[in-house]
Image (spheres, rainbow, N blue to C red):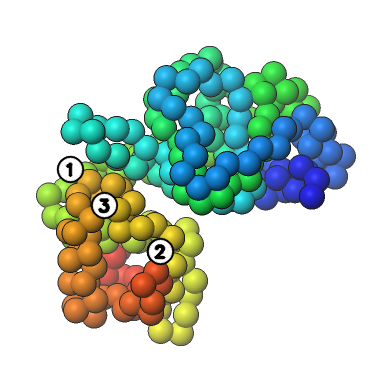
């Protein structure tokens, strides 16, 4: 499969024509990571842009207690380290493959070549980074909320908005995150996440269709958080 398909699934490139996509593909380097591989370590110098073609990556920090605090999850169509094109900097987080990941990499210089020919991409990047900041602001808000159930419901709501599938009975959501990952997002323990999920099911707010798939019966229950 040609690398141009990496560009085709990325929203910042979705308005490029075939010739422009070929320019991107000519400049990209394809790479693969296995589940559990560390893609970036905190402190690494950032000189390239990562384009995710398939798979999921978790971006996280290690807190003062030595525990993971997941900042956000990235999947196919997402990019990261775009802000490194504006200023050379070191990574402030870790990036780890949650499953087998296929990516394309663009150097900072090559990415600037693309932007010089398509200035609108720079505006898309700024909007994308703004959305990322909003996501981190929501996470901070969640973590300062003492009610763990509300924190968990907020996470489920954001996942549903991004990956949920409407159903006649509500919204189906496949939980690709493990209980441990949900706990690291919510700033709590795996046992607490499991207990709170059972509470939500007992209260009729969600229904487990399988171990990894839930039905959100009324999304309005989550909007009120």
Q: Secondary structure at mark 1?
A: loop
Q: How many marks?
A: 3
In the current view of this chain or complex, which residue is farthest to the right?
19
- Could you classify mark 2 by the number of other residues whose Cα lies within 10 Å: few (under 14), some (14-19), or many (20 or more)? some
Which of marks 1 and 2 precedes in the sequence? Answer: 1
x%, y% of residue 139?
30, 44
Which of marks 2 and 3 precedes in the sequence? Answer: 2
In depth, the one of 68 and 49 nearer the eye is: 68
Which of marks 3 and 1 precedes in the sequence? Answer: 1
x%, y% of residue 74?
49, 46
Q: Is residue 183 above or below residue 169?
A: above
Q: Is residue 146 above or below residue 32?
A: below
In the current view of this chain or complex, which residue is farthest to the bottom?
168
Q: In terms of image quadrants, where is residue 225? A: bottom left
x%, y% of residue 112?
69, 22
The alpha-carbon separation of the residues under discs 2 and 1 comes to 24 Å
In the current view of this chain or complex, which residue is farthest to the top?
88
The alpha-carbon separation of the residues under discs 1 and 3 comes to 15 Å
Residue at left 85%, top 45%? 18
Residue at left 25%, top 38%? 67
The alpha-carbon separation of the residues under discs 3 and 2 comes to 13 Å
Residue at left 46%, top 84%? 168
Q: Secondary structure at mark 2?
A: loop
Q: Is residue 61 left or right of residue 105?
A: left
The answer to whether residue 224 shows anywhere in this view is no
For label 1, the residue is: 144
The answer to whether residue 110 shows anywhere in this view is yes
For label 2, the residue is: 175
For label 3, the residue is: 183
């Amino acid at each position: 499969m040609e690398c141009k398909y990496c560009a085709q699934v990325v929203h910042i490139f979705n308005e490029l024509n075939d010739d422009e996509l070929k320019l991107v593909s000519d400049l990209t380097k394809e790479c693969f990571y296995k589940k559990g591989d560390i893609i970036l370590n905190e402190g690494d110098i950032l000189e390239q842009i990562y384009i995710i073609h398939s798979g999921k990556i978790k971006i996280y920090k290690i807190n003062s207690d030595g525990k993971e605090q997941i900042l956000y999850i990235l999947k196919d169509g997402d990019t990261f380290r775009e802000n490194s094109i504006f200023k050379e900097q070191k990574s402030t987080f870790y990036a780890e493959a949650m499953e087998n990941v296929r990516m394309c990499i663009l150097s900072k210089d090559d990415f600037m070549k693309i932007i010089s020919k398509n200035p609108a991409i720079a505006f898309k990047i700024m909007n994308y980074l703004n959305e990322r900041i909003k996501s981190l602001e929501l996470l901070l808000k969640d973590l300062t909320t003492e009610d763990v159930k509300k924190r968990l419901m907020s996470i489920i709501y954001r996942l549903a908005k991004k990956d949920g599938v409407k159903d006649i009975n509500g919204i189906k959501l496949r939980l690709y995150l493990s209980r441990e990952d949900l706990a690291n997002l919510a700033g709590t323990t795996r046992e607490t996440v499991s207990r709170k999920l059972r509470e939500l099911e007992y209260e009729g707010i969600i229904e487990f269709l399988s171990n990894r798939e839930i039905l959100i019966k009324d999304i309005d229950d989550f909007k009120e958080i």
